[in-house]
Amino acid sequence: TECSPPTADANVSQYACLRRTTTENHNKIFTDVLEELAENSEFNESKGPCLAFRRAASVLKSLPSAVHCLGAIQGLPCLGEHTKAVMEEILIFGRSFKVEEVQSDERYQALKLFTSVFGVGPKTAEKWYRRGLRSLKEILAEPNIQLNRMQRAGFLYYRDISKAVSKTEAKALRSIIEETAHWIAPDSILALTGGFRRGKEYGHDVDFLLTMPEMGKEEGLLLRVIDRLRDQGILLYCEHQGSTVDMSKLPSRRFEAMDHFEKCFLILRLEEGQMERDEGLAVRVDLVAPPVDRYAFALLGWTGSRQFERDLRRFARKERGMCLDNHALYDKTKKLFLPATSEEDIFAHLGLEYVEPWQRNA
Ligand code: DGT
Ligand code: MG
């Protein structure tokens, strides 16, 4: 059959921050497979292929229509030979044998299951797999395994927190936390970030930023909010990390490195009446408390998507000679920090057109 004209007008950028990607993904049949292959590469510590599959998926997500033939992706960036082979399988057979092979792999299945527990990363998962463990039951039954506090909470609330959180539930949480924060400090500012700020209907957790309009006034606020949530009986788990911000340091190159803001990783209970479900529901919540002069950077960094963030930093470094992270933007040529009070300021410093949060689903 005749191949439709290329979806690829030559304007698709290799950088996600120069593309607009809404939650409407016309190429899910490809991107689901590519992301699964990326995850498998991650488990095998193949960083190159992992990034390549993630970039390819991200480019396909930005396309305005579904790809129906290989001709349509000609000239698109970031689509390598492996990706094209996978797409060809899907176009011809309606399925990918490569991904089916991965899905039926015992190790992949075990690592995917283990890392679905809050507090369990690829390293721990690998360790358990090597000890011959294959199911969550086996892990809990193994007397020689020492779970840390986070992992114990992960197992305890597994049924709830492995379910997707809905937008309605995220909004209910927002009201609870906002009310709590305002009760303590009426002028405190709470912002929803992460996937829900990007307009996603479901998420694996709910992310918030909490700050005060006056510098320094945010100190102690987060701990008081946590105490108050505990008093209300809805705090199921809390891991608090104090601020380790060192502003004399240049922005970090390593994206995966966690930022230095004071934050807490919580499990909160949404109660009856606050949501559609009958019984209480345990939900994962991240609360990050940057000082107000870092707020714009923190907001940009925590809104995601991860691929959008990676490409923003890569663009800043490669195309502008600048260093961007969740705390600051540094111009290496001029040897100075570029201040910002809004996300728009940061895009402007980078010489980028502003990309709305709902266009950052790269
Ligand atoms: P989801 O899975 O529905 O919750 O989707 P997101 O996009 O909300 O993903 P999430 O909650 O893991 O993270 C939200 C954003 O926060 C993410 O795009 C980047 C930032 N972020 C989260 N964790 C880390 C981290 O460990 N390091 C860095 N640098 N950024 C992080
Ligand atoms: Mg999230």
Image: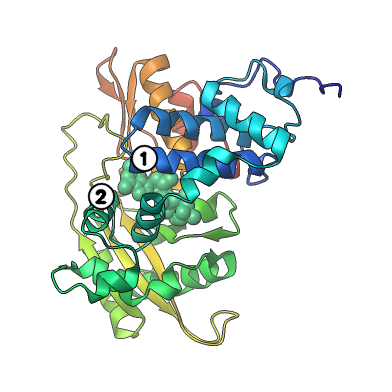
In the shown orientation, is residue 165 left or right of residue 120? Answer: right
Which residue corresponds to the image point at 44% horizontal and 74% vertical from the top-left? 160
* Amino acid residing under circle 1: Glu
Q: Is residue 161 visible?
A: yes
Q: Name the spot of residue 186 as percent of width and height, x first.
A: 38, 69
Which residue corresponds to the image point at 42% horizontal and 69% vertical from the top-left? 161
**Pointer 1 local density, CA inside 10 Å: few below 14, some 14–19, many at least 20:** some
Q: Quadrant of residue 315?
A: top left
Numbered-mark total: 2
Q: How far apart are the two marked residues, 2 and 1, measured between alpha carbons?
A: 27 Å
Q: Which residue is mark 1?
A: 42
Q: Nearer the viewer, residue 130 or 325?
A: 130
**Pointer 2 local density, CA inside 10 Å: few below 14, some 14–19, many at least 20:** many
345 shown above or below 335: below
Q: Residue furthest right?
A: 1
Q: Residue furthest top?
A: 333
* Amino acid residing under circle 2: Phe
Q: Is mark 1 within 8 Å of ligand 1?
A: no
Q: Name the spot of residue 184 as percent of width and height, x first.
A: 32, 73
Looking at the rendered structure, the secondary structure element under dot 1 is helix
Q: Are marks 2 and 1 in contact (CB under 8 Å)?
A: no
Q: Which residue is mark 2?
A: 261
